[in-house]
Amino acid sequence: MILLLIMSILIIIISNIMMLLSMILSKKSFMDREKCSPFECGFDPKSSARIPFSLHFFLITVIFLIFDIEIALLFPIIMSFNLVNFIMLMKISFFFLFILLLGLYHEWNQNMLNWTN
């Protein structure tokens, strides 16, 4: 029991010394503050958060997410080609791709894919 207590105290002391040394030896300065601030979408993090952003940027992001999820849903279909009925799997795959292509056509028809509008 005493050995466990001594080991615990020793571990706490060593970890505190290591953290203190890392804080002393780190080369942080006020100039690095800008580098450490979060950078998101080209906005200055020190200015107002209520600046309007481009709707096209948002729409392209949503389109990317939709097609990213589509790829994640197509992988299991590809992997299950030899497990289920091939004809039924092809019907499901073509229906799924038809819905995605219909959505892409709708986005193209609504000029969501044109960056300058």
Image (cartoon, rainbow, N blue to C red):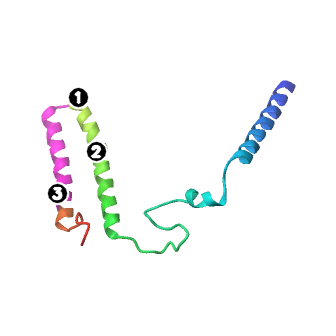
The amino acid type, in three-letter code, at marker 1 is Leu
| Residue 92 in picture, x, y percent from top left | 18, 43
Q: Position of 32 compared to 92: left or right?
A: right
Q: Position of 56 compared to 51: left or right?
A: left
Above or below 89: residue 30 = below
Q: Mark 2 points at which residue?
A: 71
Q: Mark 3 points at which residue?
A: 102
The residue positioned farthest toward the right in the image shown: 2
Q: Mark 1 points at which residue?
A: 83
Q: Nearer the viewer, residue 19 or 76?
A: 19
Above or below 102: residue 114 = below
Q: What residue is drawn where x is 35% and y is 70%?
A: 54
Q: How far apart are marks 2 and 3 (CA)?
A: 16 Å
Q: Position of 54 compared to 31: left or right?
A: left
Q: Earlier in the sequence, mark 2 or mark 3?
A: 2
Circle 3 packing at 10 Å, graded few (<14), some (14-19), many (20+), is few
Nearer to us: label 3 or label 1 = 3
Above or below 10: residue 64 = below
Circle 1 packing at 10 Å, graded few (<14), some (14-19), many (20+), is few
Q: What residue is drawn where x is 75% and y is 42%?
A: 21
